[in-house]
Image (cartoon, rainbow, N blue to C red):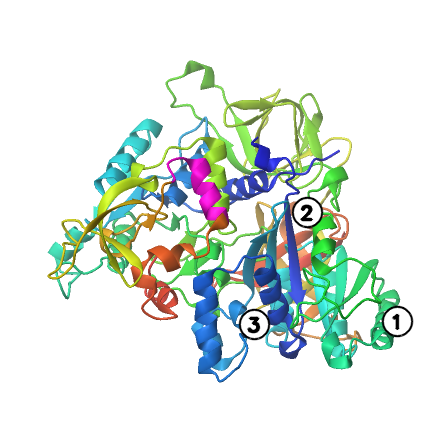
Amino acid sequence: MGANEIQDHGVLRFLTCGSVDDGKSTLIGRLLFDTKTILVDTLNAIERTSKKRGMEAVDLSLLTDGLQAEREQGITIDVAYRYYSTGTRKYIIADAPGHEQYTRNMVTAASTANLAVILIDARKGMLTQTRRHSYLANLVGIPHLLVAINKMDLVDYDQATYEKIKADYLAFAAQIGLKDVRFIPMSALNGDMIVDRGEKLDWYDGPTLLEILEAAPCAHGENGGDRDERFRFPVQFVCRPQDSANPELHDYRGFMGRVSSGIIAKGDAITVLPSGATSKVKDIQIYGQSLPEAHADQSVTILLEDEVDISRGDMIVRSDAQPTTTKQIDAMLCWLSETPLDKARKYVVRHTSRESKAILSGIEYRLDINSLEKQSADKLAVNDIAKVSIKLAQPLAVDPYTENRATGAFIVIDESTNNTVGAGMILQAN
Amino acid sequence: MSKTLSHLDWLEAEAIHIMREVAGQCSNPALLFSGGKDSVCLLRLAEKAFRPGRFPFPLVHIDTGHNYKEVTDFRDKRAAELGERLIVRSVEDSMKRGTVVLKSPLEPRNKHQSVTLLETIAEFEFDCCIGGARRDEEKARAKERIFSFRDEFGQWDPKNQRPELWDLYNARAFKGENIRAFPISNWTELDVWQYIEREGLELPSIYFAHQRPIVVKNGLLQPITDVTPLKDGEVAETMTVRFRTVGDITCTAPVESGASSIRQIIEETAATTVTERGQTRLDDQTSEASMEQRKKEGYF
């Protein structure tokens, strides 16, 4: 590795949530601007647009306006991904719109994030949507929440206002069981406490937003970061290069995939699910290189001591820590399609690299995302979240989502349209 | 105990996972290889994803007929070195068939690639094309899925995309429809150059500083070639330039640069003040939404 990679702290994926008026786009624009990610031609383009719309200062929120339809309507309609780098870390921001299709977009953006920035307008304090965003971030298993109390410039940088909102939020956090929550006062418009500290928030002695992000554990961090330590390896592809001129490869059978969680080493005893066949790891390879071990997020090829029948969709796990193999699960399901869930129909569930026909038979309750009340329901519409029980045609190797995001998550596909219509988080196997 | 993957290792592992999902889910995919730097990275990622086996897809290039010879020669050489099948289809064949009609003989052919690409997809019945597009390239791309669905006209509908959650990709398509898969969606231009350096990847020579006759137009450097000849009143000057991106000759401009190694290019890229497309793609400047418009029409 080159000298430029010595201080590489990997990739942090985070999500920003807030409504149109919370200053979310301005915050992202400010992060990109202050980390010098925005280049001159982009800045020129938004300067022109700002002028065209009769604004005096450059509107940084224009940086995150993506599609033509959004620019015309001045709204954000879909999750957008932004990138910046600080030299020590690469960041991927999932920018989720706050108002339209909020549940679908937020769940999508949150599914790959390890930290969420929740924006609160200091003038307005906690709103229903603040609760909704926090609940969804927690539901989708984001381990770290950062509550950004924005627009402090509009409340004269008043500390008492900040403390009041913080106390309100902490009371709510205890109610829904949020664990790691941090707070920061800021003005995205003026750039206070984003990358630079500014001069108006002297009473706040905590870190800036960027300092918090730089220090946040990423999912694949030291000590496993926030990740389950049990080894899970869904097989994506089986490599059998029999036609090769090299006779050594004639019996080669490599099981290709990406380590979802945990670690595996040569010689470890493994079990293949759902068959239950066992063997030992003979070698771990990538591109002709033999590795002593492989850990979470690495894409590798595993070779086994014995000839075991394994195909795409099977999962290799360490024999001493196995998931549950089941054809019946309970899950929290977020419905993503304009076509409502039909309990009589068969859908396809995709879980890791495996697919199964499924019947989404029982809706135990639907959750009112604003009041957090459980309501009885017979069908699910777009953006609904519900607890459901699911019958599967094929067994899946699952862990509860709260323990393992990779083996606890699934999507639902409608075979009549091929669309992805649902996102599920497994509560337990039955 | 797990270790932290460096950002390049993480990006590489994600891209390999995406390629293996294509191989696992699609019955007849292809990898679009132009000889450009992004698709050079795709080839290395495919090697890491599938060796010691062969690639489970052919390489495909849609040639506008206006490509630099250094790039097409490199394309052929690289495919031969890898021992993989290369399919080249030409916009000029579409012109002969009458499916591409030019308004003027030397107009940029980038947008016409869409027609030839769709004809090639139909000819070979490809159900998925792996491409080297990145989300940092352009506003419209920032919202595109890693597995992006195209209807039977090759159209991308930005307002009606499939939700994409976790790393659970949905590559399903009915006959005639198509998936475009973008394994390096999450890479930036700098990531690409750092990866090329780390992996020691070879590139076409025009990525590095060389001398070439140039006319400066509206701040962009226009190379003087057979298809972009000097016009009346224009004066060519010899400049030291390199290409940040290689595409159709008529719409790809080089930048003034003395960078003759990957390391020097990385240093320039890290310090640059203008985006890759803003500096070098003449066709994206037309309107604020021109890329989105082309993608809706089936552009890669």
Q: Secondary structure at mark 2?
A: helix
Q: Amino acid at mark 3?
A: Ser
Q: Residue A158, image x and y in percent?
A: 82, 77
- Residue A44 appears left or right of B89: right
In this rendering, does residue A395 appear at all? yes
Q: Residue at x 49, y 51 (%)?
A: B185
Q: Do the residues bearing badges 2 and 1 touch, measured as CB atoms within 8 Å?
A: no
Residue toward you, A337 or B234: B234
Q: Residue at x 55, y 55 (%)?
A: A83
Residue B264: within the magenta? Answer: yes
Residue A126: within the magenta?
A: no
Q: Earlier in the sequence, mark 2 or mark 3?
A: 3
Residue annotated with mark 2: A407
Q: Quadrant of residue A198?
A: bottom right
Where residue A140 is drawn, which disc sits there?
Answer: none
Residue name at image x 40 percent, y 49 percent: B131
Residue A91: percent from the left, percent from the top?
61, 52
Camera-side mark, 1 or 3: 3
Q: Are marks 1 and 3 on the same chain?
A: yes
Residue lying at 13% horizontally and 64% vertically, measured from the top left = B104
Q: Which mark is residue A167?
A: 1
Secondary structure, mark 3, is helix
Q: Dividing the image into 4 quarters, which one contains the C terminus of chain B?
A: bottom left
The numbered dot on residue A61 is 3
Pointer 3: residues within 10 angstroms few (<14), some, or many (20+)? some
Report the mark closest to the observer, 2 or 1.
Answer: 1
Distance between mark 2 and mark 1 Cα atoms: 36 Å
